[in-house]
Amino acid sequence: MNSRDSEHLIAELSIKENYSLTTEITDADLIIINTCSVREKPVAKLFSELGVFAKYKKDSAKIGVCGCTASHLGKEIIRKAPVVDFVLGARNVSKITQVLHQKHAVEVDTDNDDSSFDFSEYRTNPFRAMVNISMGCDKSCTFCIVPATRGEEISIPSELIVSEIQKAVATGAKEIMLLGQNVNNYGRRFSSESEVKDFTGLLKKISLMDGLERIRFTSPHPLHMDDEFIEEFASNPKICKQIHVPLQSGSTKVLREMKRGYTKEWFINRCELIRRLAPSATISTDIIVGFPNESEEDFKETMSVLDSVRFEQLFSFKYSSRPHTAAAEYDNQIDNDISGERLTRLQSRHTEILDEVMDTQLGSVHEVYFDELKSEGRVSGRSDDGKLVFVKGSEELLGHIVQVKIEKVSRSLLEGIVI
Ligand code: 5AD
Ligand code: SF4
């Protein structure tokens, strides 16, 4: 979400205000930090980075703080770091050209209408386009600050999504990534009329579009993975066989305290259905360890889900207490050493699983969509199931979907030859 917000900021500033990107901080007339606040660490990093930027920037250069930390700290940022010229919340990206001209402007409201989806064009990668389908989140997972920073969930009318995709396809994108905090809750609330009102329907509609060959999406919520959705995921050839199913915890007791709305059994059942209907699909997940009151037994339940689903990719975190969340008030916050030890156990078990999974890739053939030039005469792309693949080659491969035979495997990427 933040990457796409950054593209919107760049688009608005370059088209309406004539800015261009620079890699040299000493050349910059405007420095924008687009922040995350999901865990505490990036918030602390913001203030140390502001100190560095203040030291090296031109005297006349402005500094703006955008994103979720801007939303939840608001004017506090300017109080703590007066070098900051403006603060722009995650939901207010479309106001960038306004706040730019108001000293110490703070825009952090979470209201919305269709005008806040309307941006100028800019894409970091023309071959692979990110497209927002909803903003905000209506869930209240007790660890998560996002509903407070990004506001209530609102879906973007399907006609606007389709026209956004048409523009991306016209400029060379064969693949799109649909973005939302909770994509499969699409259709809950709109700011104006929409033809399609559910996520499965949206996938069906988008997959009819000419020139678009691959559809990915992130993140779906396990609670809303009904059979119809999984069947569409499995049977629609344009939908890439890669799916993120965020577990958070394998203990039904902890899941209840997190207010996730599903049990361990439901989660495993959904993953089993995905594995059965789409055997080539890779499943990734997010896991939090050390949630308040998590016992050794609870943690072992998480380990058991890891062993039964055998996720191809794992994003794992120590629980971080956040303001505006219910869990911050819970008793029995877990000692940092215990969380650290659980995280290490979880990650080492996952590394073993990953090594076994990747070993099976040797000699396999993947359809790879090449989208990036790399050093040493190589290009990289993604297989349908989301694996990073490198081959020797040049720009002629960019923008093409080509069959590749895998000759070398490692934990994070595959290397092969075009066949
Ligand atoms: N502490 C640790 N991890 C968190 N996440 C969200 N909130 C927290 C928190 N307070 C993780 C979840 C989510 C991912 C984006 O970040 O696993 O799925
Ligand atoms: Fe946060 Fe839960 Fe919403 Fe995801 S679904 S953004 S974890 S509140």
Image (spheres, rainbow, N blue to C red):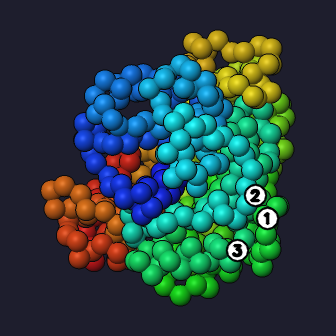
Q: Quadrant of the C terminus?
A: bottom left
The residue drawn where x is 42% and y is 57% is: 17
The amino acid type, in three-letter code, at marker 1 is Phe
Work out how far the residue at label 3 is from the one at label 2, CA to CA, in angstroms. Answer: 12 Å
Label 2 Cα crowd, 10 Å radius (few <14 / some 14-19 / many 20+): many
N-terminal of the pair, mark 1 or mark 2, is 2
Residue 158 circle label? 3
Which residue is under mark 2?
A: 154
Label 1 Cα crowd, 10 Å radius (few <14 / some 14-19 / many 20+): some
Contact between marks 1 and 2 (CB within 8 A): the answer is yes
At mark 3, the secondary structure is helix
The amino acid type, in three-letter code, at marker 3 is Ser
Contact between marks 3 and 2 (CB within 8 A): the answer is no
Mark yes or no: residue 318 visible.
no
Q: Dividing the picture into quarters, in which one does residue 270 lie?
A: bottom right
Residue 364 circle label? none
Mark yes or no: residue 371 visible.
yes
Contact between marks 1 and 3 (CB within 8 A): the answer is no
N-terminal of the pair, mark 1 or mark 3, is 3
Residue in the foreground of this view, choosing between 3 and 113: 113
Task: Give the side of residue 335 with respect to residue 228, left or right.
Answer: left
Task: Measuring from the top left, give residue 410's x and y in whole percent.
Answer: 34, 48
Residue 190 circle label? 1
Task: Measuring from the top left, give residue 160's x and y in whole percent.
Answer: 65, 74
